[in-house]
Amino acid sequence: MTISQIRSARSGPMTAAQRALAILECFDQDHLLLTLSEISRRSTLSLSTTHRLVGELREWGALERVPDGRYAIGMRILELGSLEPQGMRLREVALPFLGDLQAATNANVHLSVRDGHDVVYVESLHARGGADVLSRLGGRWPLHATATGLVLLAFAPHEFREEVLSSPLKQFTPRTVTCPDRLRHVLADVRRTGVGMVEDSITPNCVSVGVPVRGPRDQIVGAVAVTVPATKSSPHALLPALSATARAISRGLGAPSAKGRPNTAA
Amino acid sequence: MTISQIRSARSGPMTAAQRALAILECFDQDHLLLTLSEISRRSTLSLSTTHRLVGELREWGALERVPDGRYAIGMRILELGSLEPQGMRLREVALPFLGDLQAATNANVHLSVRDGHDVVYVESLHARGGADVLSRLGGRWPLHATATGLVLLAFAPHEFREEVLSSPLKQFTPRTVTCPDRLRHVLADVRRTGVGMVEDSITPNCVSVGVPVRGPRDQIVGAVAVTVPATKSSPHALLPALSATARAISRGLGAPSAKGRPNTAA
């Protein structure tokens, strides 16, 4: 949740910790570098409060000052983020296999986990000269609009799935599926086939195919996907390589179904 | 700086933002999961303050609760860390070349930037079956004890170099060089050759070799290194591949000296 979402559910003034978080959340992919007054405006904090808090955050290393005097997220946050256990453990096991997949297919490859109603990319390998997509490490996209998100949503508990389907679903392109009934059908297909697919859902002329990654109790802990230009070869041709990669990662995580002979889709 | 270092330089109570940061900094590589009372003890905050702040940090996503009830760094911090401009830009350009180097050498490969008196690993690719080293994404090690750190220190401004050499230098193994005079000689060699090397400096039986990566104004923005078991082939044999990789990354970042014909070491 954003601080303004948290605040809208409460009365009373922002707490001190919320003011510090409100400053951090001013930064996003479109706002990597901000001046003090931009931070003040975006956080709705006074310039003097912003000045004091930015100073404290910078002293600790949560923010850093770049040569032109603007502020950016600091190395300390990058370092702290590497301690997030779910994504980082997955990334560590998955990275060599994702590299193999990327080398074999020359597609963009990414690995996602679910966080709230979104997927977060914990790894993203770009093809040199591949599809120009918006995936990146640490990127966040709604579940309903991505191949990995459809996989994670399809296999999520029924109540959670309905909660997502009844929330506002963002339309990125004319081809983003946002109708709850149509999404229910799509998700039933994903459960049946074990494969999620989106076409032009966020980026025009891009097709993504995703499959689940399983953890030590065979629970779904993430999903891996390849993205190719829609004009290129059918993404279904990449499915064997993708499935083999997901199975190798699942085995690396200790998933019982990915050990020994194949029985169910890993 | 840690909150306790910041506090020791000041009088008066901890500020509210510092209390929130003190909770975040309880987590490190050896403390990925903590109970509420462990957080309280490590942060030196009362249990009631800890309880309240952990709740606020969790609501925003800075912390998350794992199934056994303990707390961990949340996905929101991982996501925020991906916005750190220096490391992430470097990583994006470097990752394909680092993958090539790892595949060609089967060595552990890492890419570091300087943060204070430390290097932070912005990327780390492990060889399958390679040297068992402690490098990892987001890892932090003192400049004087790593190959990339020696490179970054050697080419840093004189005043900064002397500041580091006059600070306490941690001895990790009997072979960590901590004597300022000996380090001055080592650093002069690094400046002359463009290559930093450490043997058994942090991890026994490991040799690392590092070279600089240059940015758009030919300034040194990071360093890339390979690490191999000391018993294996001489790390010097990897130097051509390592130098070619550093040059390719530098060119990707727009470094003038890495364009066209080689003139100086990239």
Image (cartoon, coloured by chain):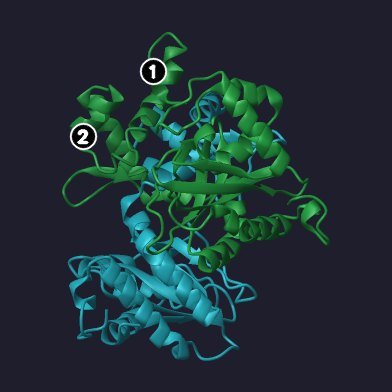
Chain colours: A cyan, B green
Q: CA distance from mark 2 to mark 1?
A: 19 Å
Crowd band around label 1 with a 10 angstrom C-alpha radius: few (<14), some (14–19), many (20+): some
In the rendering, which numbered label is found on residue B14?
1
Q: Is residue B200 above or below residue A93?
A: above
The amino acid on which the numbered mark 2 sits, given as a three-letter code, is: Leu
Q: Is residue A61 visible?
A: yes
Q: Is residue A233 left or right of residue A166?
A: right
Of marks 2 and 1, which one's residue comes earlier in the chain? 1
- The location of residue A193, given as percent across then percent down, is 30, 87
The subunit letter for the residue under badge 1 reads: B
Image position of B32 with respect to B178: above or below: below
The one nearer the camera, B249 or B22, is B249
Q: Residue at x 40, y 49 (%)?
A: B133
Q: Mark 2: give few (<14), some (14-19) or many (20+) Cα within 10 Å.
A: some
Circle 2 — which element?
helix
- Indicate the secondary structure of the residue bearing disc 1: loop
Residue B130, by quadrant, is bottom left
Residue B121 is situated, as x and y percent measured from the top left of the image, at: 50, 46
Task: Report the residue at 21% width, 68% height from top.
Answer: A219
Q: Between residue A172 and residue A195, name the one nearer to us.
A: A195
Which quarter of the rendering shows the C terminus of chain A?
bottom left
User: Number of marks in the image?
Assistant: 2
Kind of residue sitting beneath label 1: Met
**B40 relative to B252, above or below:** above
Identity of the residue drawn at 42% across and 13% down: B8
Q: Is residue A46 left or right of residue A87?
A: right
Residue B36's disc number? 2
